[in-house]
Image (cartoon, rainbow, N blue to C red):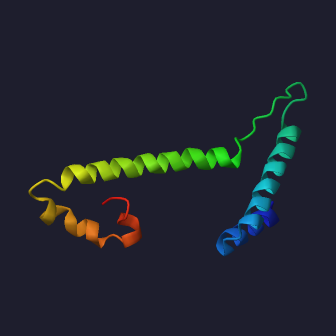
Amino acid sequence: MAAIEAAGNQAFAAKHHKNWKVANDSLGTLIVKLKKVLKPKHREEEDELPPTWAIKDFWRQQVDAEREYIAGRHRELRDKPRYASLFKGRLEALEPCSRRWIT
């Protein structure tokens, strides 16, 4: 398990997606093996995680919803009289890539 974790951390640090997938698959296989050992024999159903694409899609939708909420609040606040003194400086302090979807 330590070797799988080390390989996963190394793949994450190097941004090597193929090795990261291999480490995730290895962890999934290990989880299945552990569940088989720990579960009683009469209980056969598997508690599988959804596929990776479904998990990514779910969290992508969550992030998009948060971005839309923040952009909506920005549209509401930019017409306020105190926008320039209260919020504009904070927005400009953000990195350009962070605020490109707000304006």
Residue 32 picture location, percent across and down: 83, 43
Q: Is residue 71 above or below residue 9?
A: above
Q: Is residue 19 above or below residue 80?
A: below
Residue 44 falls in image quadrant: top right
Q: In the picture provided, is 10 more to the left or to the right than 26?
A: left
Q: Is residue 18 above or below residue 58?
A: below
For this orientation, the residue located farthest to the bottom is 14
Residue 39 falls in image quadrant: top right
Residue depicted at 69% across the width and 49% down the height: 52
Residue depicted at 75% across the width and 35% down the height: 47
For this orientation, the residue located farthest to the top is 42
| Quadrant occupied by the C terminus | bottom left
Q: In the picture provided, is 43 more to the left or to the right than 49?
A: right
Q: Nearer the viewer, residue 24 or 68?
A: 68
Residue 54 picture location, percent across and down: 65, 44
Residue 100 picture location, percent across and down: 37, 64
Q: In the picture provided, is 30 more to the left or to the right than 82?
A: right
Q: Nearer the viewer, residue 90 or 76?
A: 76
| Quadrant occupied by the N terminus | bottom right
